Amino acid sequence: MTSSPFITTTTIIIITTTIIMCCSMAGPRPVVLSGPSGAGKSTLLKKLMEEYNGVFGFSVSHTTRQPRPGEENGKDYHYVTREAMQTAIDNGEFIESAVFSGNMYGTSKAAVQDVQAKNLICILDIDMQGVRNIKATDLNPIYVSIQAPSMEILEKRLRDRKTESEESLQKRLHAAYVDIGISKEEGLFDVVIVNDSLEVAYEKLKVVLLESDRVAHGRVAVGLGDHPGLVALLAAFHPLHLGAVGRLDLQLGVAHLDGDVSPRPAGDSGGGGGGGGEEAAGQVVPKAAEEAGPLPGGGYRTADVEEHGLAHGRAADLPLEHGDLAGLLRGEAEGGARGAVALSLPRDVVLQVLQGEHRVAALRQDLGLSVWLAAIAVFVVVGFEDDGFLVIRLLVVVVLPVGGVGDGGHLVGRARDPGRRGGPGEGGVLLGVPGERRVTGGVLRQLLHQRVVGVVGVGVLRGGASGPREAVDRSDPAGETPLLRESLGDLLTLYSMISSTSTQRGLRSAGRAAAPWCSVT
Ligand SMILES: Nc1ncnc2c1ncn2[C@@H]1O[C@H](COP(=O)(O)OP(=O)(O)OP(=O)(O)O)[C@@H](O)[C@H]1O
Ligand SMILES: Nc1nc2c(ncn2[C@@H]2O[C@H](COP(=O)(O)O)[C@@H](O)[C@H]2O)c(=O)[nH]1
């Protein structure tokens, strides 16, 4: 039984029974790119948009300058007259505006809202006046300065671009001269990237946007497996935080349910499957990916993992893709905001996890720290199948902001003992994650570098409308595995485990967890 007939032929009633949210929330954090004309902002942005289509969205500014060959109205800019622009500014339609090189430029509120409405991370390409103006708003972006290696190179690039008259070029160079000085002002930019080699600069930009401690704070729900309905429901609660909703069931990007994130030392044959423990905690890197070597941030290329990961027979060597990153990148400003990341895994992964090949690799370490439960959401999905059976599905989402876990700390859950089976394939739900700045950065790194935080299964209740309901594993033809009750039990066990300091102490000293599906090595 696949999940799609169920979805298409049943009425779905979703009841959220409990949601306890105790973290501050915030929407996706936009990104401001600024820097002298000719430094390479548009070039970098173009690459970013191509690679992360569906993650970032460009805030289309208004300008009074003439379009350049190849530029499109509504895509590169909204080209308007001075009068129209001034009227719109006077009407309060702009977040900021500036005069640059004799032309008016401005970011309209609608431009930013359009991007955010699509759940994309909004990128603004604005000049230094715009940066100053944005600082006075509550947009709270990440400020990235793009600089050319030198004024000479900047001038050459601008000339070679052949877009400016001599007069315009001189104005831009003058503005650049001023900007370069201002951009050194402490605290104005979060990051300064010198665009010498385009490739190097682009990799740096990606690191900043994808892995920076500054990027993701606040609660992020990346996905709930193959069940968009549930995700939509969650989105209804916190729409700003569910940026990846549209992409949930495409590719969820998580690998390695156990093991350490750091690349294995040469000669190490790798962590044993299911071995767990510090000795066995080496990262399980797909061979081809390993040969290709880690990316600058330490992760591995999606394509390598995608192509070779699953062939290893290890759960969760799956690609981390654009849509998922959108969720990971959303969040609140730096500065101690708390939040959590809930990430679900696709069916195959869940099944493998539930079949028990994986272990808790670092629970001991994390349980010793301040871990607390922030949210439990229980979704009951009721429907009728073609054969008239009433089917009730229960999906339990646990979001666990983990306070105080050190940079790189993590909570890894092994879902079940060997032999257990997964639910009907809606996907599991990942537990996790911290809120403090350094912690969130650490968690992001874990996710991006293929650490996983934990998995909870999905159970199904099946029975006639008036008959006894029985929890069954729908992937089990015998249909006898009482999954549902145990899933709930496991969750409760998990909750009590992590919320009890004595349990934490006990676990630490015993080095083992009491829950059958959760072992500490
Ligand atoms: N790393 C690089 N090496 C060489 N040339 C580059 C590099 N980056 C960008 N360029 C080239 O420099 C020129 C200016 O780049 P680009 O138009 O992206 O700058 P910009 O910062 O967006 O400028 P503006 O603010 O005027 O829009 C382009 O012709 C681009 O192809
Ligand atoms: N303050 C703002 N500056 C903007 C905006 N859109 C673009 N810009 C900046 O203008 C210059 C020139 O751009 P060009 O396309 O004519 O080369 C460049 O530095 C841009 O960053 C805006 O909405 N507000």
Image (cartoon, rainbow, N blue to C red):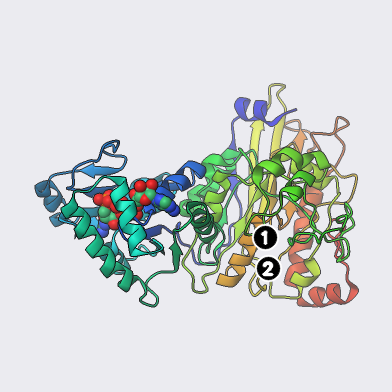
Q: Nearer the viewer, residue 292 or 125?
A: 292
Who's the residue at 36% across and 58% down the image?
153
Residue 36 is at least partly visible in this image? yes
Q: Which residue is mark 2?
A: 408
**For residue 500, side relative to residue 122 (left or right):** right
User: Which residue is at the far top?
Assistant: 387
Residue 132 is at least partly visible in this image? no
Who's the residue at 70% across and 68% down the image?
409
Q: Are marks 2 and 1 in contact (CB under 8 Å)?
A: yes
Q: CA distance from mark 2 to mark 1?
A: 7 Å
Tell me which amino acid carries mark 2. Answer: Gly
Find residue 77 and report its horizontal and vertical position in percent. Answer: 27, 44
Q: Residue 262, located in which quarter of the rendered image?
A: bottom right
Q: Cβ(mark 2) to ligand 1 < 8 Å?
A: no
Q: Nearer the viewer, residue 285 or 334?
A: 285
Find residue 259 and report its horizontal and vertical position in percent. Answer: 80, 59
Q: Is residue 383 above or below residue 519?
A: above
Quarter of the figure with the C terminus = bottom right
Helix, strand or loop at mark 2? loop
Q: Which residue is mark 1?
A: 446
Tell me which amino acid carries mark 1. Answer: Gln
Q: Is residue 508 above or below residue 232?
A: below
Find residue 196 and report its horizontal and vertical position in percent. Answer: 45, 58
Helix, strand or loop at mark 1? helix
Circle 1 residues within 10 Å: few <14, some 14–19, many ≥20: many
Q: Cβ(mark 1) to ligand 1 < 8 Å?
A: no
